[in-house]
Amino acid sequence: MKTTFGSPPGAALDALERAITDEVAGFARDDRKIAKLQARQARRLARAVGLAETRAELLQGGLTPKAREWARRSLRAEVACASRRSEGAVSRLFADAETLVADLPETLAALEAGEVSYAHARSVVVHAGSLPIEARGSFEHAVLPQAREKNPARFDDAARRLREVHHPESITRRAVLAREERAVWLDAERDGMATLHHHLPAVDALAIHDVIDQAARAARGDMEPRTQAQLRSDILADRILGRTDGLAVFTPSVIVTVPAVVLAGCESTPTTPPTSTPGDPLAELHGYGPIDPATARRIAAAAPTFLRVLTHPVTGDVIETAGRYRIPTALREVLIVADEHCRFPGCGRRAARCELDHTVDWANGGRSVASNLAHLCTSHHHLKHDGGWQVTRPPDTGPTSRTLEWRSPLGATYRTNPAARSGGDPPPF
């Protein structure tokens, strides 16, 4: 369509506007449908928990606290594997579902009707969940009308304020308990970056932010290329690590797997300095993933020790080291790097914080060799021995393979491979 500048757009523009209106209306309808499905999922999960506990009661001849705990843990793993979610995420879904069904029927009904989103419902759950049961009904009745009017971010702020009004305990008492939840955790991001979370008292958080913000503003100048945000980030890291001129006064403990060609600086066509291309071998930072060659070489230059590991040239499997029940230190270190995480489906706990488990128990003839060892976190180690989950090494994967096949109490099967094999390429030891 050709029009002169300033001329009336006519029927074509009217048609475009109607089409956009239809798409927006369709998007809103889909949003309501999604909310209804999420309400249905909540009801399903709440029923599944009840059914799992009933099953445990029939199997055990009574529902003891231990039987109830194992029923829930096994169901959590079952749902996580079936839906490809983490068990932590499934635990939150269980808690949300049970709270909505048992304590927040108005919120669940509003979600079911498509009047509020799951983000609104979860905000009600989070704030109501920290209230005594007897105070949840009045809080829900007061806060729900705002959920129908405000977006999730603004509603969450309103819900937080209303929670203060409806909480029967003093804020002094609650602040003491809330301090017990302080923590620091790490999320790996793309391109060699990560996000460090620090959950701490608000006064301390604001004070820290103010200190680094003032320092960043003081560092600004005509010759300073960094933004305010970049300066705050650099100043915080430098102060915590005690760096001067970008060098740390202590050496953190890190494990890096570096191909020889990367270490030598010849992973691609020689340049000055060496660079990398998409097809080049990658160095791996344990607990994070691929890092750039220059960073790997810088870490290797400061490394006090090296561990040389031989692997199968085609499959990448670690060559076995036979031994007694006690596992050699070198083999433990190799398997930490190879597994990277707990070997239960979907578990993200780092291998260094897990236990080495004999897939075929030592008491049943299992050997302390790489193909019979895998890292399991404490929770999944117990799930294997006490929770009804079975694990075997599939016979079709070869005698040195470290592939594991898990079978749930309900008969579903899942396979897991070492982290070094998950991308399809042999690990570059």
Image: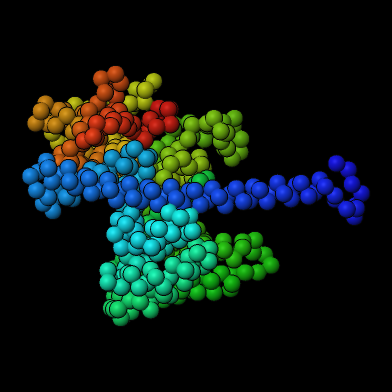
Badge count: 0
In this orientation, which residue lies closer to the viewer: 389 or 318? Answer: 389
- Residue 384 at what x, y percent from top left? 19, 38
- Residue 369 at what x, y percent from top left? 21, 28
In this orientation, which residue lies closer to the viewer: 209 or 3? Answer: 3
Q: Classify 157 as above or below 392.
A: below
Q: Classify 417 as above or below 284.
A: above
Corner quadrant of residue 354: top left
Q: Residue at x 43, y 27 (%)?
A: 425
- Residue 244 at what x, y percent from top left? 48, 63
Q: Is residue 128 left or right of residue 157?
A: left
Q: Is residue 36 left or right of residue 379?
A: right
Q: Residue at x 52, y 45 (%)?
A: 191
Q: Let me know if residue 206 appears in the view.
A: yes
Corner quadrant of residue 201: bottom left
Quadrant housing the C terminus: top left
Q: Let me know if residue 355 appears in the view.
A: no
Quadrant housing the N terminus: top right
Q: Residue at x 33, y 50 (%)?
A: 43
In this orientation, which residue lies closer to the viewer: 46 or 157? Answer: 46
Colour convention of the picture: rainbow
- Residue 158 at what x, y percent from top left? 47, 72
Q: Classify 392 as above or below 126.
A: above
In this orientation, which residue lies closer to the viewer: 77 or 325? Answer: 77
Q: Residue at x 48, y 42 (%)?
A: 291
